[in-house]
């Protein structure tokens, strides 16, 4: 009975199926808002689902000279890690007291996996453009990971040295959101910028750069593996803002009217992402590195110092 | 018609192959994606990689330099893939018909699913061709 329950937990709610449906919805919102910003009508409601189903029905090509195992493994790696992150997040949202020590660290660690999967995908597909994309993705990962971890550290310090996700949520329930303090808001801004880079959206989309390296690491993918990659990107777009709402902005509460408020917070964060995406030009990869290791890391460290001083 | 075919019909991704056109058809093709015509309404997207494509839109007479590349690209595409001849040039040869560098109309090189006449065709004509292609898929 217990095993059946946990399997259901992983596959239906809040695991794979729920996250996938939510991800499809969120990616539609992304495309629709983008269209509205550009004064277009935009795609119909079911569009991402059509894209996904169509890709499942297409031929899968494995390019000659590629590493077949890695080529097919990387989309699955990306999908499973996001599913686990989503399950853990919702688990703590629903039952904040039932985490394990250090689940915050595990979540931060698992959030790196999609980028690793993209790097593997790019290097295994035997294509010069996808290799360039993968190497850019690697630099991007190196640049944003440091400030991201430091900004999460601010939430840990502010909530009284808690590395339990559930306790951070509880702390925010009692004392107000982390982003309410000066150090918290600084860390939140840093985390939003890092999230933009994690999602590889404009202005940090150098690894994919449709107009110069035509999709980068995904260039050789077709059919089902491409569908899985797309789905995992959409799921990441759903999960990452949720994580930030959880850590910095008072958590996602399920009971009564709080649910509406939580959804509104989430949608606001999502729209911020989409608006940044639609109004910014693309940074070169060296500029990204300078930006993240220079001003943004400085800002994050400043936030940590302020957090220690209790501001 | 099953959901799978319906999905293919509603999510056609276009790969643009310029086989030696005078560049006018290319501009008209890009016009279709502008806010005024907005092809994304029908789920149509321009993709950069042939592996993602459902439609290969060929513009221009395919010249002798381009012919082997076009054949290679057609083989690289993940099937099912449809070919659209966009403009008078790939349909018949157009104004370049008897030139020294012409490698023949497009349908002598790869099978073609839809023809869009016009030199260059209007964006409306391109949209109507794609709608016809969609109806043909049923
Ligand atoms: S059909 Fe006309 S406009 Fe189009 S490429 Fe040929 S000559 Fe140019």
Image: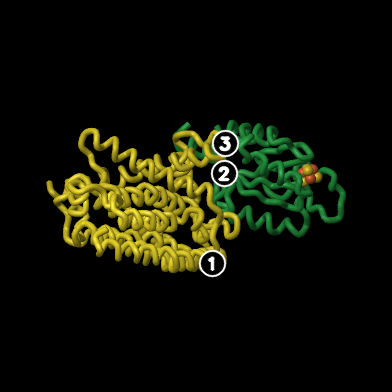
Chain colours: A yellow, B green
Residue that badge 2 annotates: B45
Q: Compare residues A262 and A142 and report the one nearer the observer.
A: A262
Q: Quadrant of the C terminus of chain A?
A: bottom left
Figure quadrant of residue A265: top left
Q: Residue at x 43, y 46 (%)?
A: A272
The answer to whether B85 appears left or right of A27 in the picture is: right
Find disc 1 in the rendering and name its residue.
Answer: A132
Q: Which residue is mark 3?
A: A39
A34 or A211, which is in the foreground?
A34
Q: Quick check: can you spot residue A112?
A: yes
Question: Is the residue marked by circle 2 packed among few (<14), some (14-19), or many (20+) residues within 10 Å?
Answer: some
Find out whether the residues at labels 1 and 2 contact each other: C-beta distance under 8 Å.
no
Q: Nearer the viewer, residue A75 or A252?
A: A252
Residue A144 at what x, y percent from top left?
Answer: 41, 63
The span from disc 3 to disc 2 (Cα, nearest Å) is 17 Å
Q: Is residue A47 above or below residue A200?
A: above
User: Regarding mark 3 in the picture, which secondary structure is present there?
Assistant: loop
Q: Position of residue A128 (x, y in %)?
A: 56, 67
Q: Is label 2's Cβ within 8 Å of ligand 1?
A: no
């Amino acid at each position: 009975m217990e095993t059946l329950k946990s399997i259901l937990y992983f596959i239906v709610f809040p695991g794979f199926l729920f996250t996938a449906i939510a991800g499809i919805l969120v990616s539609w919102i992304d495309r629709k808002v983008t269209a509205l910003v550009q004064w277009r009508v935009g795609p119909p409601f079911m569009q991402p689902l059509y894209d996904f189903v169509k890709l499942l029905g297409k031929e899968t090509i494995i390019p000659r000279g590629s590493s077949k195992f890695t080529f097919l493994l990387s989309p699955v790696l990306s999908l499973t890690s996001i599913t686990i992150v989503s399950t853990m997040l919702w688990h703590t949202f629903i039952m904040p007291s039932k985490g394990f020590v250090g689940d915050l660290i595990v979540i931060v660690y698992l959030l790196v996996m999609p980028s690793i999967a993209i790097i593997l995908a790019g290097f295994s597909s035997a294509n010069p453009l996808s290799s360039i994309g993968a190497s850019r993705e690697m630099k991007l990962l190196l640049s944003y990971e440091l400030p991201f971890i430091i900004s999460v550290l601010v939430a840990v310090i502010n909530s009284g040295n808690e590395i339990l996700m559930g306790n951070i949520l509880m702390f925010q329930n009692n004392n107000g959101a982390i982003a309410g303090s000066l150090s918290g808001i600084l860390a939140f801004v840093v985390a939003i910028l890092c999230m933009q880079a994690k999602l590889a959206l404009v202005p940090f989309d150098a690894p994919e750069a449709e107009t110069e390296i035509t999709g980068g690491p995904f260039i050789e993918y077709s059919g089902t593996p491409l569908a899985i990659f797309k789905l995992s990107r959409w799921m990441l777009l759903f999960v990452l803002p949720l994580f930030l709402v959880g850590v910095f902005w008072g958590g996602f509460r399920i009971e009564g009217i709080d649910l509406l408020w939580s959804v509104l917070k989430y949608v606001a964060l999502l729209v911020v992402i989409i608006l940044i995406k639609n109004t910014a030009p693309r940074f070169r990869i060296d500029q990204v590195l300078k930006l993240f290791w220079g001003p943004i890391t400085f800002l994050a460290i400043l936030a940590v110092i302020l957090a220690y001083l209790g501001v | 018609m099953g959901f799978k075919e319906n999905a293919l019909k509603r999510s056609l991704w276009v790969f643009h192959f310029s086989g030696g056109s005078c560049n006018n058809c290319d501009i008209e093709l890009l016009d279709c994606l502008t806010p005024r015509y907005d092809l994304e309404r029908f789920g149509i997207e321009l993709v950069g990689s042939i592996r993602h494509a459902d439609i290969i839109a060929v513009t221009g007479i395919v010249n002798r330099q381009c012919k082997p590349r076009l054949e290679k690209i057609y083989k690289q595409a993940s099937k099912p893939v449809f070919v659209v001849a966009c403009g008078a040039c790939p349909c018949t040869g157009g104004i370049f018909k008897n030139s020294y560098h012409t490698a023949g109309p497009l349908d002598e090189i790869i099978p073609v699913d839809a023809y869009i006449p016009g030199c260059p065709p209007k964006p409306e004509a391109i949209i109507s061709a794609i709608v016809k292609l969609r109806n043909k898929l049923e």
